[in-house]
Image: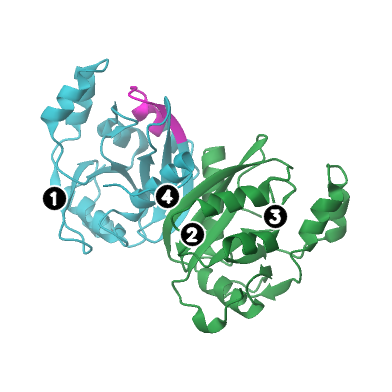
Chain colours: A cyan, B green
Amino acid sequence: MPFSLFHIKPEIRILGIDDSALVSERILVVGTFFRGGMWLDGVLSTYITRDGMDATDSLIRMISASKHRNQARVIMLDGVTYGGFNPIDIVRLNESTGMGVIVLMRSMPDFENIKNALYHLEYPDERFEIIKKAGRISRVVTSHSHTPVYIQCAGIDEMSATRIVQLSATHSNIPEPLRVAHLIATGIICGESCGKP
Amino acid sequence: MPFSLFHIKPEIRILGIDDSALVSERILVVGTFFRGGMWLDGVLSTYITRDGMDATDSLIRMISASKHRNQARVIMLDGVTYGGFNPIDIVRLNESTGMGVIVLMRSMPDFENIKNALYHLEYPDERFEIIKKAGRISRVVTSHSHTPVYIQCAGIDEMSATRIVQLSATHSNIPEPLRVAHLIATGIICGESCGKP
């Protein structure tokens, strides 16, 4: 159910989701409920299998069980593979949760490289299909940097998604829900959080 | 080394520390580095023993190993017992880290009740000595609520500590570094964060 630009408020509830470092077979995934780019309202967590095929189901279960699920309108992901190459089906994630999904990337993905890497794992074709399903990539520039970020969307139009990325990127060109989810996931697993390249 | 009100900037670096629910013998403790009450700069974590005597040493080790240790000027604690009745010696924490320590409490502690509870554990007198060492309790009212909070201090004067609590309580009458450390610790251990009474 796409929604229009007309309805986007500065305090729109966003759920940012990131994973931790690949230090074991069970990978911690952290969700942060934010109001726009300002306030952290809640934290979720779950585990997925490193290079497994369970990320989409685990995320749907984590979100469905949350008391915040009816307030949040948008999910933000950091790429479409978590815990190594565990792919997230963003169309199914949108349909199951009713929330728009925005995938954020720091650079344009190199699909040839990804395809080659997948052939070292089980189900390479299924994984690649799920990754391709995320669809069209568009470019977003925030007020923090001339370096653009890139997005893919499901259940939300590109113009609305662009606006939401821009309004929630209050501290860097990475939206706060994703920046903070990353700090938490690495801080818990490694003892101290670390930045991303 | 106490510091004066004169030096307190709105973006003073604060390390807030809270623990998670008592669901096992090893209790997760989370630290959040904040700039004033606004930005989360980093996340730390460690584990302490439920009802053990290792909390002070674990916190000192966690802080000493951090890359942020030279920027943060103040540590905020949520009470002086973590992981059940594992007591934190705030004088030793201040001396070992060089950072001022502010203990925040939602209500006046009932020392008679605490003393009775301690007698079900090993080392009750040592625990009570450490708890009493936190010293004088003073009352702070923030702009968010008529309900006061209460503080104890080590290595920082009460007036400076009061100002720091007030400037970092940007979202409720609990300073952001403690509010967010609590959301993280419970969200990671319970799957979803929960509030405090």
Q: Is residue A47 magenta?
A: yes
Residue at the image position 63 percent from the left and 80 percent from the top = B159
- Three-letter amino acid code at the position of disc 2: Arg
Disc 1 to disc 4, C-alpha distance: 24 Å
* Badge number at residue A139: 1
Residue A99 appears left or right of B72:
left
Residue B2: % across, % down: 61, 76
**Do we see residue B192 in this rendering?**
no
**Disc 1: CA contacts within 10 A as few (<14), some (14-19) or many (>=20):** some
Q: Are marks 4 and 3 in contact (CB under 8 Å)?
A: no
User: Counting residues from the N terminus, which is met first, the one under dot 1 or under dot 4?
Assistant: 4
Residue B190: % across, % down: 56, 38
Examine the rendered structure and indicate whether residue A181 appears above or below residue B13: above
Q: Are marks 2 and 3 on the same chain?
A: yes
Disc 2 to disc 3, C-alpha distance: 19 Å
Magenta region: which residues? A46-59
* Badge number at residue B69: 2
Q: Which residue is mark 4?
A: A33
Parent chain of label 4: A
